[in-house]
Amino acid sequence: MKYWVGVASLDHVRGGVAGGFCQLGHGKHAPVKRLSPGDRIIYYSPKTEMGAGEAVQAFTAIGEVLPGEVYEGNMGGNFMPARRDVNFYKAADAPIRPLLERLSFTQGRSSWGYAFRRGVFQITEEDYAIIAAAMGIKI
């Protein structure tokens, strides 16, 4: 089992949660193919909308990748993003600022936001447990 953080605006995260799927890297196939059934994924939302909106700076969804293959969603206008099905847990949003000194990928870094520029990255089980607990999830 691996643990992942995906980065997406809050409106995109909410759409994925409602539809029971994840998309990563603006719909690219390669990031989604790295996920396996049973992996855990947490979404971080920097803003309410892609490229705009108000600051969120919180972890906004958490779930488990379900069995099944990567598939394409039809968003119209020839946009066919890669997706995987996810069982999202009922969870509270967790602001990142109280967690900065506890997470290995932000601890001691004044430029903590740099880690999120990758769009998706693997985290440790310990980091996952810290974020999950902040979101009200017991693991």
Image (tube, rainbow, N blue to C red):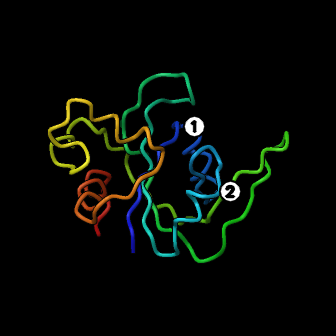
Which residue in the protein does label 1 denote? 11
Q: Which mark is residue 95?
A: none
Image x and y of residue 95, in percent: 31, 38
50 left or right of 46 in image: right
Say what secondary structure mark 2 lies in. strand
Tell me the quadrant of the picture where the N terminus can be found. Answer: bottom left
Q: Which of label 2 and label 1 is nearer to you?
A: 2
Image x and y of residue 51, in percent: 56, 25
**Cα gap from disc 2 to disc 1, whole angstroms:** 18 Å
Dot 1 surroundings within 10 Å: few (below 14), some, or many (20 or more)? some
Which residue in the protein does label 2 denote? 82
Q: Determine the residue positioned at 55% across, 22% down.
A: 52
Q: Does 52 sit above or below residue 64? A: above
Q: Does 53 sit above or below residue 27? A: above
Q: Determine the residue positioned at 34% across, 35% down.
A: 114
Dot 2 surroundings within 10 Å: few (below 14), some, or many (20 or more)? many
